Amino acid sequence: MERDEETSGPMMEMCTNGGGEEKSNRRPIISGEPLDIEAYATLYKGRTKIMRLLFIASHCGGNQTMQLEALRMAYDEIKKGENTQLFRDVVNRINGRLGDKYMMDSAWCEAVDRRAEQKKGRLENELSSYRTNLIKESIRMGHNDFGDFYYACGLLNDAFKNYVRTRDYCTTAKHIIHMCMNAILVSIEMGQFSHVSSYVNKAEQNPETLDPIVAAKLRCASGLAHLELKKYKLAARKFLDVSPELGNSYNEVIAPQDVATYGGLCALASFDRSELKAFIYPNKIFHILLIDNINFRDFLELVPEVRELINDFYSSRYASCLEYLGSLRANLLLDIHLHDHVDTLYDQIRKKALIQYTLPFVSVDLSRMADAFKTSVSGLEKELEALITDNQIQARIDSHNKILYARHADQRNATFQKVLQMGNEFDRDVRSMLLRANLLKHEYHARASRNH
Amino acid sequence: MNKMEALITSIQGLSGSLGDLCALHARLRKAEDSLRINSNVQLSILKQLDPSIHSLGYLYILEASTSGPVWKKKATLLIAQFINCCDAGQIRLASEKFVILCKRFKDRVFKDPLRGVGPMLSAVRKLVQVSPKRLTALHPDCLQLCLQAKCYLAGFSILSDDIVEVDEPRDFHLYCYYGGMICIGLKGFQKASELLYNVVTAPMHEVNSIAFEAYKKYILVNLIHSGQFSNSLPKCASSVAQKNLKNWCTPYYEVGNYYNDGKISELEAVVVAYSSDFENDNNLGLVKQAVASLYKRNILRLTQKYLTLSLEDIANMVQLPNAKEAEMHVLQMIQDGQIHALINQKDGMVRFLEDPEQYKTSEMIDVMDSVIQRTIGLSKNLIAMDNSLSCDPLYVGKSQVGRERQRYDFGDDFDNFPHFSM
């Protein structure tokens, strides 16, 4: 039984806005087109903006214009801050290609360094005076200020140490949360995601209920941590739990578009069909039940291509789904967190698509399947062979006629076989055991008789 | 001379009932030394006796006549005849002498083994008649002779599943080792694997060379039979074995590892590299069989994934040179019953079928029934052995002493405890 396939071209609607509001951050930034760096950069603020721009510059392949654009914006951003190390770095990379305005400004560097020294001295004095006075709150503020200072200068380890030191002087829940958020921020920048997880846990263990925005931020952070540890299912769950009230408030780490992209891709790669439906594709009839998902739908509106691709996957339009994935790939590789995982996620999504395609059928024509997945029949055969070996598909390939037949193991025969095998094994093992026991017994007797 | 004549008459007279035989036995034992001295007389005495009726006397005299380094030529022939027609009941009374006699006989005919196979077989059978579950000292010798003569079926007939009692560990090791080799000769790799496994896991305090050789063959036989190879010995092997057996088996470990990877060309390269080692151990033939079995293993894996496959594709996937060879291999496997398939020569296609066994016939029910009965019997044996061990004074003593030594750790009290010196 073959099903009718809508092999007419993928129904693609590139809707630009979800609700029609013209907020600048609702433009589809992550799309199939080459990345609009300015728009991308406006999504973020703080150190992460700089790091992302530098990442794009180093990973955009041979694309000179993109690279120079990214470096230029990075230069501008760094100059607004106080990080001379990064400044030197960027200038080296620009290498004079952007003209005179973007050259090494040693005067600025020296001025910033001097200011930093003075500030450091001042902070140290304050801190020591607070310490002698033993006022908890002031000591905490002092360490915090130190932490902020080091973070601005780019000395992340020292910043982290100082933030963690405030722990001993925290008195209210709010202080603890403040410390956790700072520690999380620095850990993400340093790439130490184990710390991120532990501090998220610490913040969530807070007896008071958290402010929803803070809760959303914590979920984003733990989602990122899981993503880095390749625990895609947990990451997806965390991202999907983020409430839309997050908006732009966590721009120093992550933009709402990222939440949608990461969450959507991880969910596709790791959820099974019912979970996918429950979380992302709410049943139109039962509005009332799945209110949470409406949250994620708001996120998905920000990245319409990801939304379309998930819809396509769920409705088995694999060709268009894989097409979207292909077009998004180049831009996703420029994302600082997703870069290492793009290939694995794509691989998993493709495998799931293959498995899902074959699931409802008793027999599948391999040439039609190859068309749907835009690959050759022999390539498809190899992929299917790998999946059958892994026991993910229960089927066998008829290589002569190029058909895949579903095959369900005969339980009854398998049971009989197993029983006979088990009987034989028992037989062998017990006989060996009896022999060994007799040998040991013989040794005791031999030794005893020798000694008497 | 008179003594001899008296002896002859007593043998002839007392070879009747059991009571007489015991008396005769005692007299023979006393007369043993004098028998040895008079070698000329022995043969003449033998002519007067009938081996099947006067077996005990005949045995003593034969043993005396062969105790020296030089035998008479007729002696070998006489021994063969004696073994064939002697009375098992009488032999039982002097079984050690019988064993010694047979061993000497075996050493004599080793150069010309075919002569000795028949007599040795009947010797073993006569001893086994007495206690079927016991391993005698003659089993390994007989097996060795059969191996030498390449009479594998003959040797196979005395390999029994029911051996439980063992007198001498060395006999057991040799029995299992030779038995394994006989099974390899008959291509019964399952049984060979079992026997070699018994040697490898036998309890031992020092590693002996039998265990080494057996382990090497065990690895290869396992590869041929089930395609499995593991770097570690089975858990029930003794600690001595576990530490030492691996050291000298590096070439075999290499073969095992490359076999697991499944690439024929690399495996063959390894075999060529170590071929001198294999030849020294007389294992080269076995190694070649293992390499051949890798092709079979790979084809078997293909049956799991494909319903039909062209011969060309099979040849490519299994790294055979061409489709003709693939066809030969598949044909061989179908004949051996390892796979179920149909070859369509017109299209050059092979169609893999499911195992047609439906487990619905009465023969199958009989098989299952016998397996169940055997299992029940074995469990009973195991429980019986466990019970008897718990009552065995030696065992109880050792386990008690161990426990008591742990509890009482004071130095001066130590000597007051009754302990077994082991």
Image (cartoon, coloured by chain):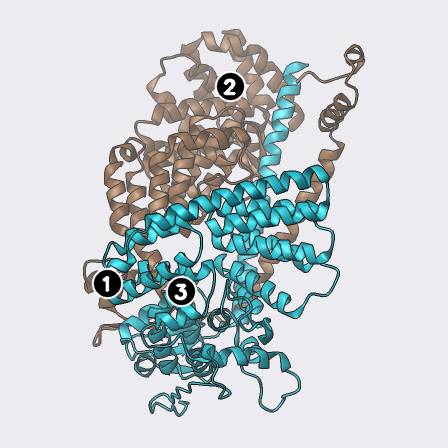
Chain colours: A cyan, B brown
Q: Residue at x 49, y 73 (%)?
A: A260
Amino acid carrying mark 3 in the image:
Asp
Q: Which residue is the site of mark 1?
A: A62
Can residue A51 be seen from the camera position used here? Answer: no
- The chain letter under disc 1 is A
Is B311 displayed left or right of B75 in the figure? left
Neighbour class for label 3 at 10 Å: few (<14), some, many (≥20)? some
- Give the quarter of the image for residue A375: bottom left
- Give the quarter of the image for residue B72: top left
Q: Which residue is the site of mark 2?
A: B60
- Give the quarter of the image for residue B314: bottom left
Amino acid carrying mark 1 in the image:
Gly
Marks 2,1: beta carbons within 8 A? no
> How far is the residue under mark 3 from the one under mark 1?
17 Å
> How far is the residue under mark 2 from the one under mark 1?
101 Å
Q: Position of residue B104 (x, y in %)?
A: 42, 22
Label disc, if present, on residue A335 of the rendered structure:
3
Marks 3,1: beta carbons within 8 A? no
Neighbour class for label 2 at 10 Å: few (<14), some, many (≥20)? many
Kindly state the secondary structure of the residue where label 1 is placed: loop
